[in-house]
Every structure is written in structure tokens, then in C-alpha cells.
Image: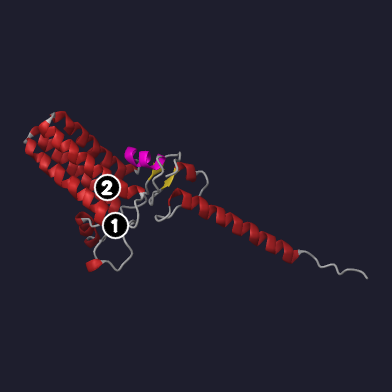
Amino acid sequence: MPRRSGVYIVATHRWYIERTVWLIAGIYLLTATALALWSNPLWVAAIIVMGMVSVNVSLTGFCLIGNALKLLGFTPMLGRTPPTPGNLYFMQTDRWYLERRIYLAVGINISIASVLSLVHSVWWLAFTGFVGVAMVWFAATGYCIMANGLYWLGAEPRLGKSREAEHLGVEGSRDQGVEGWKRRGGCAAADRASSDERRGSAAAPFHPSTP
């Protein structure tokens, strides 16, 4: 993957399914972490369940919360093109784009931290709490530390646009990342130049040659 620069921020123009899932998951993770810390350490089982669900979403695309949100009228930005089995919501899994990698990384990390909080030190819950705060922040602002780390390493995003592309005034689609916006912007400029050239040729006067 080619490395890149800039700041990656996901789209926050509306509450689509994926963004709302991040918010709910962040609140759930913070609640489970607080209960494990101040009520009963066995509440880490709830964190492990969330971690397994997150890994499953990255591998299969199926998300239970996403389908519940779909029934409530929310629409996806990373959903598979219908028809899908049972007309259910499935996240796109055609390749390992940036947002899909986040589900996998978060699921693995919080599961490991949960186990370590039981067998090593309760301070590992600070990590799961940090991830919960980061997920809520991600949903609210579109900025995520892990997402930017993956972006800099070359993972291709399907949501939002980077500040590197913003100064070009080029909007991005959910299926193409920042490079797609640049390519599309370049094509549009080329089309305009070609159109201007054709108009100029049409307007030029015709001078017949003199024998």
C-alpha cells in the first residue's frame, strides 16, 4: 500500500448506519468498561462479545445493530448493493478498505485488553475505555486516530475526504477514496479544457486559400 499524507475525516453530513453503529458501540463499550471496573470484573465478558461481533462484521459484513437501524429508517453508506440475503443490511466486503479494517482492529484489540484485565492488571480497562471514547468522538466529529494511522499507511477509505483533497474543492464518493476524488477532479478539468477547445475551433473564422 502506498503511504500518503493528510488528515482523514469520515463523512458527518448525516447519521447513516455505519456512523450510528460507531456511536452505539462506543457508548456500549464505555458502559461495559465502567461496570467491569466498579461493579463486577466479569462484565469484561460483554466487552469480549462486542469484540467478537466487531470481528464478525469485518469478515462477513453482517451487523445486527446495523439491521435494527435499517428497520428504523437509517440508510447505509457502506452497504452491499441489493439484493442481499433476506434483504438484510450487509457491509461491503469485496476488499479490505480502511473502514473495514477498523472493525477488525478494534475487535481484536478490545478482546485482548479485556482478557488481560482479568489475568494481568485491571489497568487494561483504561484501554477499552479509551477506545470507547474514541468511537464516540469518531461518530461525532469524523476523526479517528486509528483511521488516520491506517490512512497514512495506505489503506483506501470509502467514506469522507481528507484535508489534502478539501483544498481542491473536490467531493468524494463513498466507493472511491481520496485518490478517486483527485482522479475525478482531474477528468472534469480535462473535459472542460476539451470542451473549451472545441468551442474555440467552432468559433474560428474560415479563410479559404487563394490559388
Q: Can residue 171 be seen in this view?
A: no
User: Which secondary structure class fits the magenta region best?
Assistant: helix
As helix, strand or loop, the secondary structure at mark 2 comes to helix
Q: Residues within 10 Å of mark 1 (few under 14, many from 20)?
A: many
Q: In terms of sequence position, does the residue under pointer 1 or pointer 2 come before the other?
A: 1
Left/right of residue 202 with respect to residue 2 in the rendered view: right
- Is residue 150 located in the magenta-colored stretch of the structure? yes
The region drawn magenta spans: 144-152
Q: How many labels does the image show?
A: 2
Look at 17% across and 44% down and name the residue there: 28
- In the rendered image, the vertical position of residue 210 relative to residue 39, given as above or below: below
As helix, strand or loop, the secondary structure at mark 1 comes to loop
Label 1 and label 2: CA atoms lie apart by 11 Å
Please provide percent x and percent y for residue 191.
Answer: 60, 59
- Pick whichever, 209 or 108, lies toward us: 108
Please provide percent x and percent y for residue 198.
Answer: 68, 63
The image quadrant where one finds the C terminus is: bottom right
Look at 15% across and 34% down and name the residue there: 116
- In the rendered image, the vertical position of residue 25 relative to residue 113, given as above or below: below
Q: Which residue lies furthest to the right in this view?
A: 211
Residue type at mark 1 is Met
Please provide percent x and percent y for residue 66.
Answer: 23, 56
Q: Residues within 10 Å of mark 2 (few under 14, many from 20)?
A: many
Which circle marks residue 103 in the picture?
2
Left/right of residue 187 with respect to residue 195 in the rendered view: left
Residue type at mark 2 is Tyr
Residue 107, quarter of picture: top left
In the picture of the structure, the residue carrying the numbered disc 1 is 91
Look at 30% across and 45% down and name the residue there: 102
- In the rendered image, the vertical position of residue 47 relative to residue 97, given as above or below: above
